[in-house]
Image: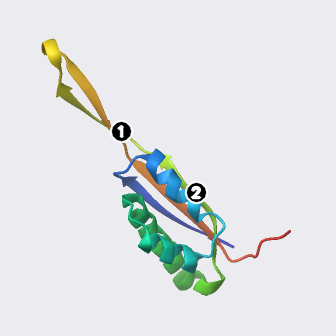
């Protein structure tokens, strides 16, 4: 069984967040949550919030135990960009792109086969 949790419009670059997402894949949910709480990255705190939501969905909606949950996928997809302009030399303007991300975590209670 798969459990989903999504955080949208997080104000962090998807490139920076994908480094944290790569560390989560395949780990148990409890262990990943403790590792996220020890990381000193903004995206780690946002992924921890999403992971807590996925665990709560599994416990409350499907009566699953948190010890049996494993992270199947963790992704940081690009969201919309805020476009701002900064004054440049000779009357020009430079574009500043403030990127956002959508975080998705999928948990499963099935063991790996292989």
Q: What is the CA distance from the residue labelled 2 to the residue labelled 1?
A: 23 Å
Q: Secondary structure at mark 2?
A: helix
Q: Say if 3 sits above or below 84 in the image.
A: below
Q: Position of residue 4 (x, y in %)?
A: 56, 66
Q: Is residue 43 left or right of residue 26?
A: left
Residue situated furthest top in the rendering? 90
In which quadrant will I find the N terminus? bottom right
**Which quarter of the picture shows residue 26?**
bottom right
Q: Say if 82 sits above or below 38 in the image.
A: above
Residue depicted at 27% across the width and 27% down the height: 95
How many marks the image carries: the answer is 2
Residue depicted at 52% across the width and 53% down the height: 19
Q: Say if 61 sits above or below 77 in the image.
A: below
Q: Position of residue 42 (x, y in %)?
A: 36, 60
Specify few, some or many for label 1: CA neighbours under 10 Å numbering under 14, 14-19, or 20 or more: some
Q: Is residue 47 left or right of residue 114?
A: left
Q: Is residue 64 visible?
A: no
Q: Position of residue 17 (x, y in %)?
A: 46, 53
Task: Judge depth for marks 2 and 1 and give the one in front.
Answer: 2
Residue depicted at 43% across the width and 63% down the height: 44
Residue depicted at 62% across the width and 63% down the height: 25
Which numbered circle lies on residue 99? none
Q: Mark 1 — residue?
A: 81
In which quadrant will I find the C terminus? bottom right
Q: Mark 2 — residue?
A: 22
Q: Secondary structure at mark 1?
A: loop
Residue situated furthest left in the rendering? 91
Q: Position of residue 55 (x, y in %)?
A: 53, 78
């Amino acid at each position: 069984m798969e459990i989903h949790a999504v955080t949208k419009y997080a104000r962090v670059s998807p490139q920076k967040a994908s480094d944290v997402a790569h560390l989560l894949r395949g780990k148990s949910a409890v262990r990943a949550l403790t590792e996220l709480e020890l990381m000193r990255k903004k995206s780690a705190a946002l992924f921890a919030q999403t992971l807590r939501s996925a665990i709560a969905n599994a416990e409350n909606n499907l009566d699953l135990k948190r010890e049996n949950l494993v992270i199947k996928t963790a992704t940081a997809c690009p969201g919309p960009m805020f476009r701002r302009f900064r004054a440049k030399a000779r009357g020009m303007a430079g574009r500043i792109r403030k990127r956002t991300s959508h975080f998705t975590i999928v948990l499963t209670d099935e063991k790996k086969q292989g």
